[in-house]
Amino acid sequence: MRKMYLLRQIPSEAQIRKLLRKIVFGKNIFCPICRRRKVIKENNRFWCIKCRTRFSLLSHTWLSHLKIPLQTFWLVLWCWTEQVPVKQTARLTQLSVPTIYHWFSIFRSHLPDDPQVLEHLVQLDEAYFGSRPKKTMRALFMGKQMDSRKLSFKILNNTYRAGIP
């Protein structure tokens, strides 16, 4: 029952495209190469009159090789932001567990680099990911300011939890 309710909350493909267009381009579509606004729309692609570059909504972004439907991507992103466990996310989205791990790592890698300075009361949590046999374990430390939405994080490479050699 909850899954059906959740799936009805996902925006349509057209609504997601509209939101992505606003995020990527703002008010006016422009060529990602020459930044000109003289662009012609052909089907779901665009063509720059000045430099003759053909591009799509996500072609020059970190989502350029997105091979899953936008609604599935939206659900994976929602699960990541709501801290839904990986296996539960895999069941909800009907994607494999390695695919979910892949997308979660991509989301982590695109967090802002400049950490904010947090003040007052802070919640702090840590997560460990990587491969223990290959000794490539990493630690992610994230802090959230209690009375705001400010987040700060730090990824430490080649770290080990206490008790793990």
Image: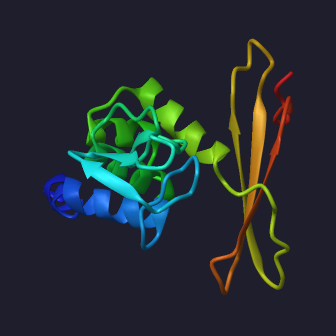
- Which quadrant is home to the N terminus? bottom left
Measured as percent of width and height from the top left, residue 28 is found at 42, 69
Residue 113, image quadrant: bottom right
User: Is residue 93 toward the left or the right of residue 118 in the image?
Assistant: left
What coloring was used for the rendering?
rainbow
Q: How many marks?
A: 0
Measured as percent of width and height from the top left, residue 30 is found at 47, 59
Task: Name the foreground residue: 92 vs 42.
Answer: 42
Measured as percent of width and height from the top left, residue 118 is found at 82, 76
The answer to whether 57 is drawn above or below residue 20 in the figure is above
The answer to whether 62 is drawn above or below residue 16 in the figure is above
User: Is residue 64 toward the left or the right of residue 148 in the image?
Assistant: left
Task: Name the foreground residue: 42 vs 13.
Answer: 42
Measured as percent of width and height from the top left, residue 122 is found at 76, 75
Write the residue at 37% across / 42% down: 89
Task: Name the foreground residue: 157 vs 112.
Answer: 112
Task: Name the foreground residue: 132 vs 152.
Answer: 152
Write the residue at 36% across / 42% down: 88
Write the residue at 87% across / 21% down: 165
User: Is residue 157 toward the left or the right of residue 11 in the image?
Assistant: right
Q: Residue furthest top?
A: 133
